Image (cartoon, rainbow, N blue to C red):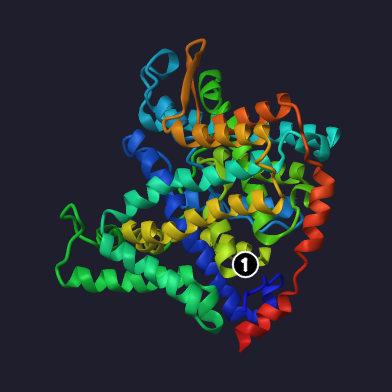
């Protein structure tokens, strides 16, 4: 029997809810801590702290849920879109930046992130006063569906790259996820990601003890950072500073991330069969994301963004209760106070993250396909074919983005931003629009009414 979704996870009991929250924490953890690791490389060890990053992810997610009336099951983790901006600021060597250390440049990069977060609020106000229906005329399923597909597929190289460090571990992680998702019983069926991480990590410990190594000859596990880390310590906050040069580098990236945000909210809506763009409203989700990003930048953290990895977990687990996401956020906050625990989880081999990502990233793209199919996008119409084709080629083809210079500032638009902008423009100018936002959402709501008690009974059996 096809499982239906669980809207109220409290009926599963507290122990199961805690495990589900842990699964979401593992889903976001690898990508979230990878951002500060990469930024530290740009800033030669004087970049963003992993502890601060985890705190920003947890608190930012809770801020988002508060502003969205606790309705949207989204997790906010570190955004990869701003990595180019960090690298640019780290390399600035003119004007006031000429004699700065890397640690002195970082606060200005974070100040740019604060301004980027505030731009979210500007777009949210436009939606609030103009109306979501008018805005969504520019964002029909023929645009959002292919964008969601691109979000998953652009992550695909990362999954393969991570998995290639140790294909045996990656295959074990992937196999465990598939097995328990298809053949698992009771609670095991709805925590396949967590089981994939734990079982493959146990295998990694065994392989490491047996003397096996990764493909490049490096050790499978390295506990050096774990043994040297303190058990409990406060986060090393960095207060942001503002400078026009840094703002012009970082803030425009928000154009790209706002487009990705809309695609992510569409993906989450499609996953849980609820229209979050209408209720609590796209303006609220944008404000939540924007304030979370501004908060992160203010204390020295990376920009936040809604996480596709956790959307994949929603699809796999069929548990769509936002309370589970908030539990994951609390886990992240608690972990942010423990360098030792963070280092232990950070020791998770990248191959395991890659193996699990094979399912998660592919699931995101599959959600985009479902969004197109369920909204009955007519691809016999040339306009729809053209829009989807341009989005897909742009989203996958501009692997390095598009860089242009404004004055003396170099600005890079990511491939997803380019795809979203071109899709929106083509949809606006090509004749033959056939999408009515309210009508299609109403029909989808009627078709997708489900009783979560059926799934709860199946889990209990």
The residue nearer to you, when weighing 222 against 4, is: 4
Q: Does residue 243 appear anywhere in the picture?
A: yes
Please give the name of the residue rendered at 76% of the width and 38% of the height, measured from the top-left corner: 136
458 on left or right of 226: right
Residue 18: image location, x then y, percent: 57, 74
426 on left or right of 104: right
The residue nearer to you, when weighing 385 against 397, is: 385
Screen quadrant of the C terminus: bottom right
384 on left or right of 179: right
Q: Is the residue 330 above or below the residue 291 in the image?
A: below
Residue 354: image location, x then y, percent: 37, 56
Please give the name of the residue rendered at 62% of the width and 69% of the height, measured from the top-left corner: 318
Farthest top residue in view: 407
The residue nearer to you, when weighing 104 against 171, is: 171
Helix, strand or loop under label 1: helix
Q: Is the residue 201 above or below the residue 247 in the image?
A: below
Please give the name of the residue rendered at 63% of the width and 83% of the height, measured from the top-left corner: 458
Residue 434: quadrant of the picture: top right
* Residue linked to disc 1: 324
Farthest bottom residue in view: 461
Residue 135: image location, x then y, percent: 77, 35
Crowding at label 1, few (<14), some or many (≥20) Cα neighbours within 10 Å? many
């Amino acid at each position: 029997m096809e499982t239906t979704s669980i809207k109220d996870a409290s009926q599963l009991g507290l122990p199961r809810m805690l495990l589900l929250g842990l699964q979401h924490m593992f889903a976001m953890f690898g990508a979230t801590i990878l951002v500060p690791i990469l930024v530290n490389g740009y800033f030669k060890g004087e970049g963003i702290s992993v502890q601060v990053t985890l705190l920003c992810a947890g608190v930012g997610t809770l801020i988002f849920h508060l502003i969205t009336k606790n309705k949207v099951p989204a997790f906010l983790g570190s955004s990869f879109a701003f990595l180019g901006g960090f690298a640019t600021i780290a390399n600035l060597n003119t004007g006031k930046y000429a004699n700065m250390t890397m640690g002195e440049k970082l606060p200005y990069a974070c100040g740019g992130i604060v301004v980027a977060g505030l731009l979210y609020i500007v777009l949210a106000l436009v939606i609030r006063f103009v109306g979501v229906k008018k805005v969504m005329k520019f964002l029909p399923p023929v645009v959002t569906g292919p964008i969601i597909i691109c979000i998953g597929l652009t992550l695909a190289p990362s999954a393969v790259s991570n998995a290639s460090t140790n294909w045996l571990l990656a295959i074990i992680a992937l196999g465990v996820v598939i097995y328990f998702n298809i053949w698992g019983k009771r609670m095991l069926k709805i925590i396949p990601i967590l089981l994939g991480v734990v079982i493959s990590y146990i295998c990694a410990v065994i392989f490491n003890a047996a003397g096996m190594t990764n493909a490049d000859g490096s050790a499978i596990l390295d506990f050096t950072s774990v043994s040297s880390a303190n058990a409990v310590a406060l986060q090393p906050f960095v207060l942001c500073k503002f400078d026009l040069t840094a703002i012009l580098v970082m803030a425009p990236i928000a154009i790209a991330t706002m487009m990705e945000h809309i695609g992510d909210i569409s993906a989450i809506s499609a996953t849980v069969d609820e229209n979050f763009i209408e209720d609590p409203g796209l303006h609220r989700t944008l404000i939540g994301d924007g304030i979370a990003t501004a908060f992160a930048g203010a204390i020295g953290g990376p920009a936040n963004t809604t996480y596709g990895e956790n959307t994949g977990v929603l699809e796999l687990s069929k548990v769509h209760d936002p309370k589970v996401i908030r539990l994951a956020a609390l886990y992240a906050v608690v972990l942010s106070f423990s360098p030792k625990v963070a280092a232990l989880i950070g020791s998770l081999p990248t191959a395991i993250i890659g193996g699990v990502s094979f399912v998660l990233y592919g699931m995101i793209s599959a959600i985009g396909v479902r969004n197109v199919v369920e909204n009955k996008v007519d691809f016999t119409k040339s306009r729809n074919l053209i829009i989807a084709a341009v989005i897909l080629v742009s989203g996958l083809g501009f692997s390095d983005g598009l860089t242009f210079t404004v004055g003396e500032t170099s600005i890079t638009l990511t491939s997803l931003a380019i795809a979203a902008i071109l899709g929106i423009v083509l949809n606006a100018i090509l004749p033959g629009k056939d999408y009515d936002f309210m009508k299609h959402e109403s029909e989808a709501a009627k078709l997708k009414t489900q009783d979560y008690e059926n799934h709860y009974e199946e889990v209990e059996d």
